[in-house]
Image (cartoon, rainbow, N blue to C red):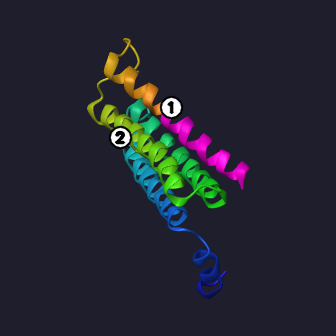
Amino acid sequence: MTSDSAAPFIDSLDGVTIATVIAAGILLAWAMLLGVWKYQLVMASPVGQAHVYVDIAHRAALRYSFATLVLAALAALSAWPSWVNAIAVVVPLAFFVGAIGSYILHGALRDTENQFHPRPGWLVKGFMVALIVGEVGGTGVLVAGVIAA
């Protein structure tokens, strides 16, 4: 597809879909940079492994980048108004970024190998409940929008 032939396709997409595809690209680039960090740690490690949370951050960012593309496709096909689709995308995306950020923090600090042991306090538990509701809820809204279309 040349840039001329892509223009009608891109012009047919709404702003929410385009922004979500761009967000997926940013997450993918972030994942690749995390892969560089992981590689540096593997090469410097006597056992050939990066810290567990650097590894988790890298893999999570890769997976979330593709999950974000799925959100873009769902938003593009949804019958809901753009503002509903935007909220349904932004909420899970914010939790994706928050989760990756927490993994990076633990990897950089090397403060734990399991953020849920010992059992976390109310703040982490509250974040996890919000994450579950936000990610599942946002995706559910978009899937319902596709069904309604």
Side (left or right) of 119 relative to 72: left
Q: Give the quadrant of the C terminus.
A: bottom right
Which residue does the image show at 63% across and 81% down from the upper left? 8
Which of discs 1 and 2 lies nearer the camera? The answer is 1
Residue 115 seen anywhere in this rendered image of the structure: no
Name, please, the residue furthest toward the top: 118
Which residue carries the number 2 mark? 101
**Quadrant into which the N terminus falls:** bottom right
In terms of secondary structure, where does tag 2 sit?
Answer: helix
The image shows residue 144, relative to residue 24, as above or below, that is above
Q: Is residue 139 left or right of residue 27?
A: right
Read off the magenta span: 133-149
Residue at 46 percent of width and 32 percent of height: 131
Residue at the image point whose x is 48% and y is 43% from the top? 92
- Identify whether 140 is placed above or below 73: above
How far across and down, in percent of the image, does residue 51 sit? Answer: 38, 32
Say if the magenta span includes residue 135: yes
Q: Nearer the viewer, residue 83 or 62?
A: 83
Q: Secondary structure at mark 1?
A: helix
In the current view of this chain or complex, which residue is farthest to the left?
109
What type is the residue that disc 1 sits on?
Val
Q: In the rendered view, does 68 fall on the left or right side of 125?
A: right
- Residues under labels 1 and 2: Cα distance? 19 Å
Dot 2 surroundings within 10 Å: few (below 14), some, or many (20 or more)? some
Amino acid type, callout 2 = Gly
Q: Tell me the crowding category of disc 1: few under 14, some 14 to 19, or many 20 or more residues within 10 angstroms, Cα based.
A: some
Depth check: 51 or 29 in front? 29
Residue reaching furthest to the bottom: 4
Residue 17 in sight: yes
Q: Which residue is mark 1?
A: 133
Q: Residue 122: where, in percent of width, then height?
A: 33, 17
